Image: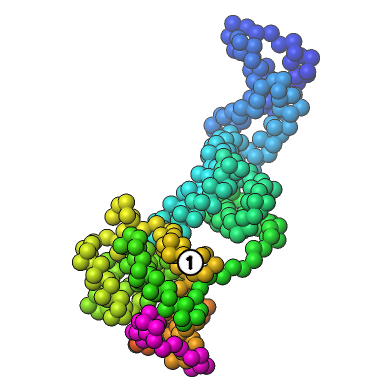
Amino acid sequence: MPLTETRLRALKTKDKPYKVADQRGLYIEVTPAGGKHWRFRYRLGKLEKKLVIGSYPEVSLKEARDATYEARQTVASGGDPAFDKRKKKIREEFLSAQTFEAVAREYIEQMMVQNGRAEGTIIKANYFLDQLAPAIGNRPIHEIEPFEVLAPLKRLEASGKHETAKKSRSFAGRVFRYGVATTRCKSDPTSMLKGALITPRATHYAAILEPKELGGLLRAIDDYTGHLITRFALQIAPHVFVRPGELRHAEWREIDLVDRVWKIPAGKMKARRTHAVPLSTQVIVYLTDLAELLGQDGYVFPSARTSQRPMSENSLNAAFRRMGYSKEEVTAHGLRATASTFLNESGLWNPDAIERALAHGDSNVVRGIYHRGKHWDERVRMAQWWSDYLDELRSGGKVIKAKFAKG
């Protein structure tokens, strides 16, 4: 006889567990402790199995029958409902442990650290994670909805950190896409947030673009009384016009003083391509003097605290401030704009050679590879000319008269 709610409520405990059948393989098991547990008995071939459905009254008679119907459908199609339930439980437990922060840290380690991304890039990734973690760090990544990501981004925006908000959203998107690729979530909720944030105004790094002012800066650098290694970095930076992070992470093993070239590995470059920097006679002299002081081991510009790390990210800009230059007048990154402007205005050099010297990416990959080889000799001559011109400005000599650059 099928069970009814009245019969279920009337079931009493006994000294041993016992079963009361309902219909179509469904039954309830009553334990000595008073528990009433729904079970579904079924066969797969010659093997008898059972599915745990739940406990009464939390799972009602109707709900137990509905679950039994679905289980019977699974069996009829060749499936195993007990196995499917175990698999679902394991996946739910796995996903509940896959928080946004856990997946993000795995992404940083697997996709950035082990792929040799630049240290500065990894530091920034951890910084963006720190901005997001208080809001969504402990949330299972597969449960996070767009509004949850938007909330911390809007807080950053409200505090005036528009660029940080934008880049934090971008970082979160990369983490979610990594989560999709590794089956931890099904979609990237940040894709729905495009247009929800204020677009930051483009800012340019302050740079000196007048010859006399540049000469004054070079003289101020020579007179700098701060840390000796910082002064060497300041003296070399205008000649090589690499990015500040690339300069401070330079290692002696990358520099060939005989062949006069500095080969920067792809992992340290913004464009993720190896970059070669021709070294002028002046730069070779600076590096030789520095090598005699420090030796040729490890970082060229080590931290003042430990030789195991490069100088700090703010060392060069802090030195400029000590010299009396404001951030609106000159920045370490702005030295690249200074070199680009003067070299283009000289009219002596192919614009492609200048762009290659600045390690600017080429949207045409084949063209980029071709130009790297084609312009090397010109870049070597240009590097020496630029260093000689800086010496002229330092001594108060001749200045460039702008011309149209040759194609």
Three-letter code, disc 1: Tyr
In this rendering, would 368 be left or right of 44? Answer: left
Residue 78 position (above or below residue 332): above
**Which residues lie in the magenta part?**
383-407
- Asked if the stretch drawn in magenta spans residue 306, the answer is no
Quarter-of-image position of residue 247: bottom left
- Asked if the stretch drawn in magenta spans residue 406, the answer is yes
In terms of depth relative to the viewer, which is nearer, 223 or 166? 223
In this rendering, would 364 be left or right of 394? Answer: right
In terms of depth relative to the viewer, which is nearer, 21 or 326? 326
Answer yes or no: is residue 368 visible: no
Residue 258 position (above or below residue 402): above
Answer yes or no: is residue 114 visible: yes
Q: Residue at x 53, y 49 (%)?
A: 129
Q: Residue at x 75, y 21 (%)?
A: 2
Which percent across, then down, holds residue 122? 45, 56
Q: Residue at x 32, y 51 (%)?
A: 305
In terms of depth relative to the viewer, which is nearer, 71 or 229? 229
Mark 1 closeness class: few <14, some 14–19, many ≥20 residues within 10 Å = some
Residue 218 position (above or below residue 99): below
Which percent across, then down, holds residue 147? 69, 48
The tally of labels here is 1
Which percent across, then down, holds residue 362? 50, 78
Element type where label 1 sits in the image = loop
